[in-house]
């Protein structure tokens, strides 16, 4: 019987978003700064396999960055 211990899930944290024309994206280079629609106090979205599962806050400790889960989002039924 397979176990959940061997299942991989991609976790992503969304700090903010922005929209920009493709010609600006094509000109981005190393060191470019992309302004987001969020501030450092805003909650971040936590995604599992591109589906929102939680909200959290960014924690900085020394040179480490982490995300503290503050709220689990309700699950939606599969196919809904």
Image (spheres, rainbow, N blue to C red):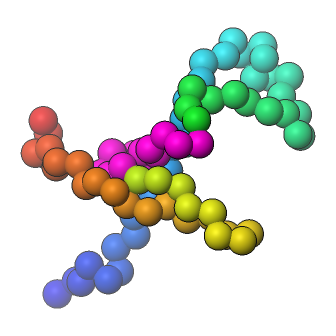
Q: Position of residue 35 (x, y in %)?
A: 69, 28
Q: Is residue 69 left or right of residue 28?
A: left
Q: Name the image quarter holding the C terminus.
A: top left
User: Magenta region: which residues?
Assistant: 40-55
For residue 77, above or below residue 62: above
Pick the front one: 43 or 31: 43
Direction from residue 43 to residue 74 in the image, left or right: left
Image-quadrant location for residue 66 = bottom right
Q: Position of residue 31 (x, y in %)?
A: 88, 40
Furthest residue toward front: 41
Determine the residue positioned at 45% across, 58% down: 11
Vertical order, 1 against 62 (above or below): below
57 displayed left or right of 40: left
Please report the residue visible at 23 percent of the width from the left and 49 percent of the height from the top: 73
Q: Is residue 48 magenta?
A: yes
Residue 8, horizontal then vertical, whole percent: 40, 69
Is residue 26 visible in the rendered image? The answer is yes
Q: Main secondary structure of the magenta part?
A: strand
**Quick check: 48 left or right of 32?**
left
Seen at 44% across and 63% down, the residue is 68
Q: Residue furthest right?
A: 30
Q: Nearer the viewer, residue 24 or 62?
A: 62
The N terminus sits in image quarter: bottom left
Is residue 34 located in the magenta-colored stretch of the structure?
Answer: no
Q: Can residue 12 be seen in this view?
A: no
């Amino acid at each position: 019987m397979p176990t959940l211990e061997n299942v991989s899930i991609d976790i992503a944290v969304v700090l903010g978003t922005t929209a920009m024309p493709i010609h600006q994206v094509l000109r981005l280079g190393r060191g470019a700064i992309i302004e987001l629609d969020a501030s450092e106090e805003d909650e971040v979205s936590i995604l599992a396999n591109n589906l929102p599962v939680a909200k959290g806050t960014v924690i900085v400790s020394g040179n480490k960055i982490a995300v503290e889960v503050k709220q689990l989002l309700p699950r939606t039924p599969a196919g809904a």
